Image (spheres, helix red, strand yellow):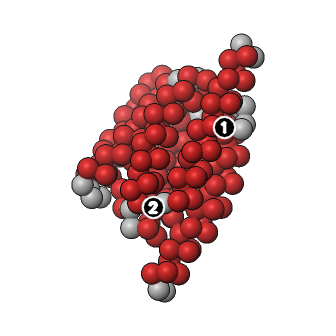
Amino acid sequence: MSDGALLWLAYTIGAIGIVVEWRSYVLYDAHAFRRWSAAGAVLWGLMYLLLGAWTAALTMSCTAARTLVSGLLTSTTRKHMFAGLFVSIFVLMTVVSWQGPVSLLPGFAVINTTLALFYLENRAMRIVMLASSAAWIVNDLIWQAWPALLAEAVAVVLNLRTIRRLSEGQ
């Protein structure tokens, strides 16, 4: 497959990821948010793989499992154990796939989101995840991952809207 065809395939997968990602951010239910977000992570991981962004591909793909597991744990001990496990996995993936300082962006984003998903409730979780979005936006600019950049930028707006509405409901 030619480089141009791979690029278009990556962007097509990314476009599908846009729909899935945006859907997750307009949901008020934290569990539904996690399910849709996990599906989006699989698509983003594949897109980053096709773009040659190894750290982003590895960490994003693993976030699907992390996102799903984080909503199922009720025991504090298990939350700590799995949060530590996923943070360790993300650090290892960042080191193994190191492509220079750019690798710190997805590394930070997935670790920050991991801690938010495991330890914060719906509204606070979304607020902390805005920092992760900023790191992904910079990463997407560097890798020219235009579908992910568009999705993340709109996700920030949707997430801010949902945060505001959750605040009004309290």
Residue 167 disc label: none
Neighbor class of circle 2 (other Cα within 10 Å; few <14, some 14-19, many 20+) is few
Q: Residue at x 61, y 69 (%)?
A: 12
Residue 4 placement (x, y as % from top left) = 49, 80
Residue type beneath disc 2: Gln
Relative horizontal placement of residue 52, taking residue 121 as reference (left or right) = left
Badge 2 element? loop
Residue 35 placement (x, y as % from top left) = 65, 45
Image quadrant occupied by the C terminus: top right
Residue linked to disc 1: 158
Q: Are marks 2 and 1 in contact (CB under 8 Å)?
A: no
Most distant residue in the bottom direction? 1
Relative horizontal placement of residue 105, taking residue 144 as reference (left or right) = left
Residue 29 placement (x, y as % from top left) = 71, 32
Q: Is residue 4 visible?
A: yes
Residue 144 disc label: 2
Q: Residue at x 47, y 86 (%)?
A: 2
Badge 1 element? helix
Instruction: Name the N-terminal-most of marks 2 and 1.
Output: 2
Q: Quadrant of residue 15?
A: bottom right
Residue type beneath disc 1: Leu
Q: Is residue 39 visible?
A: no
